[in-house]
Image (cartoon, helix red, strand yellow):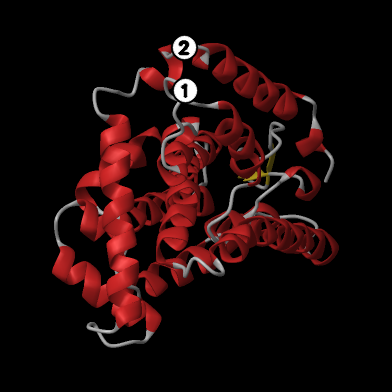
Amino acid sequence: MWSPSCKPVLSSGHWRVPQYLVGIHPSRVLLSSRHISDVHVILLRLCRVRGRCADRAERYRLLQPPTYLPNLSLAKVGRIYTLWAFTTIFLLGAILTTIAKGPHGLAEIYAGRVISGIGIGAISAVSPAYVSECAPKEVRGRITGCFQIMVATGVMISYFINFGVGIHIHSGVNVWRIPFGFQLVPAGILALGLLTVKESPRWLASVGRNEQAVRNLAYLRKEPVDSERILAEMAEIEAAIEEERRARKGLGFKEAFLGKGNFIRFVIAFTIFFLQQWAGQNSVK
């Protein structure tokens, strides 16, 4: 999640981070996080709870280390409000890194990166789950698979931003402030976009708000609320929720780690993720 780090140098009274070492990835505001997406496939395949696979979206949220906080809030406040909260956190972190200056500028950059990292880690867990719950089952896999395309596209854009800054700006605070500040653009688009979307019908059904769930589902499918397709899909959602409740009955968070055979699976996945980051791949810019 973090950019490759190297101590910035003080230039003209301001902290100056060399362009080729500033690995800002604005793509990660676009519902993407390369490192999370790389490891979540491993976790989804390896983790089982007492021999029974839980819902994919639930396991996705539960087993990503940067996403424990949103996992706790999702069930209570819903997908949209959770996305709003962590988008705000990301924006605060991005603003802090952009306005950093003076003798404490480096500390402000570090703090801002930590704050924005928490925000984007949570967004990267919640948004794919939200999209998968809203998408029609016929195209759900393809739409959710766009996650990795967003990652690659955004990373490419971030590299070109750094490349352009390196060519046209050779000194001064703008060398690092522009790449940091550009994160605010996609984050702002995300924040505005959240004003136009509906809450997940699946989440609404899971908290007993079935009437609103039907209305939102009809809105997403562009069909009347009493159409056969809407009623049939709603029945499938309710049946799936009930089945998951029965499967999880008596199970808690600790089962993901302490259940039979799960701890070694977690260690393997975590170790792969850890060694991937320490291989130095992010230093190649």
Q: Give me the C-alpha separation between circle 2 and circle 1.
A: 8 Å
Residue displayed at 35% across by 73% down? 197
Residue neighbourhood size for the residue with mark 2, other residues' Cα within 10 Å, grouped as few (<14), some (14–19), many (≥20) = few
Residue displayed at 26% across by 35% down? 246
The total of numbered circles placed on residues is 2
- Three-letter amino acid code at disc 1? Gly
Of marks 2 and 1, the one in the foreground: 1
N-term-proximal mark, 2 vs 1: 1
Q: Is residue 180 left or right of residue 215?
A: right
Residue 91 position, x and y percent, is 42, 56
Q: Is residue 274 left or right of residue 168?
A: left
Residue 175 position, x and y percent, is 71, 56
Q: Can residue 199 be seen from the camera position used here?
A: no
The residue carrying mark 2 is: 260
Task: Tell me if residue 188 comes above or below residue 34 in the rendering.
Answer: below
The residue carrying mark 1 is: 51
Residue neighbourhood size for the residue with mark 1, other residues' Cα within 10 Å, grouped as few (<14), some (14–19), many (≥20) = few
- Three-letter amino acid code at disc 2? Lys
Residue 108 position, x and y percent, is 48, 39
Residue 10 position, x and y percent, is 67, 39
